[in-house]
Amino acid sequence: MRKTACVVVGLLLSGTHTPGADRPARTRDEAKRVQGKVVPHEPQPLSRTPQRIFGTITYDTGTNSGFHPDVFAGAANLNRTVGNRFNSAYTLPLLMTGMVWRLTVFPANDGDQSVSIADTPTSMNTAMVLVFVNAPLMANQFNAVDLTPGVWVGPDFLGLFIGQFNAAQTVLLGMSDMSILGQGFHAIQAFYTTEGGGLQTMIDMVPNRNAMLRANVDILVPVELMDFRIQ
């Protein structure tokens, strides 16, 4: 019996035709269907090369709840600056390096005023000023100040507004009193000095506020965070 079965199998194998003898060869998809299963597409391994993303990091709601500083203190407000510490977006750390091309600000007053970008604050609550730009601004509306060329920053930097240099500052910049998309509060205040090529000193948080100051950026992020969006 076993011998007979072997002979039958041998005859069947010897009678098998090559695929191209009678009909075209099955395509790969046809073969999958005949076998009763479809093999899912296997994703290509992710490249770890950083990808470039353009956007505007926004912490404020767009509604002004008052200007800061809201108390006039004479000489105590000399060269006071107000702005945001940019170190997150959509609850994630920035995890990036890149360029800032524009700051958008909501000032209280008309006239020539200034914006600046500063580096990561030190443990002494100071930060090196990377750029300082003067521009004619309109009160009670958003003004875009382009930075040409752009300013190279790391994953933690400051965007700041100052009124007129060497003047006592009050009611400088609009403030939002709500946090959006779980990003928390980022408003800071500091004082500008020309020492050391330009420094922001006495950097301190403004509690429960986000400055109405936005940073337009061109950043690099790991490809794993390609769903990381900036608004």
Image: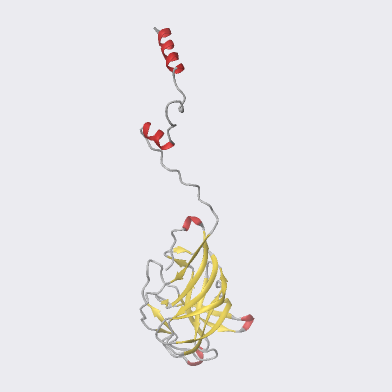
Q: Quadrant of the N terminus?
A: top left
User: Between 141 and 75, which is closer to the camera in this rendering?
Assistant: 141
Which residue is found at the position 41% from the left and 69% from the top?
A: 184
Q: Using the rendered view, name the quadrant where residue 177 is placed.
A: bottom left
Q: How many marks?
A: 0
Nearer the observer, 188 or 123: 188
Nearest the camera: 70 or 173? 173
Give how far across and how far down residue 14 sits, in percent.
Answer: 46, 16
Q: Residue 41 lies in what quarter of the image? A: top left
Please identify the quadrant where the C terminus is shown.
Answer: bottom left
Q: Residue at x 52, y 91 (%)?
A: 167
Compared with 31, 143 (above or below) is below
Look at the image and tell me whether residue 97 can be seen: yes
Most extreme residue toward the right, as rendered?
196
- Image point (49%, 77%), residue name: 103
Measured as percent of width and height from the top left, residue 35 is found at: 38, 31
The answer to whether residue 89 is left or right of residue 100 is left
- Give the left or right position of residue 176, taking residue 131 as reference: left
> Residue 122, can we see it?
no
Return the residue nearer the eye: 85 or 122: 85
Asked if residue 148 is positioned above or below residue 27 in the image, the reply reads below
Q: Position of residue 95 (x, y in %)?
A: 51, 62
Q: Residue at x 48, y 73 (%)?
A: 215
Measuring from the top left, give residue 211's x and y in whole percent: 43, 78
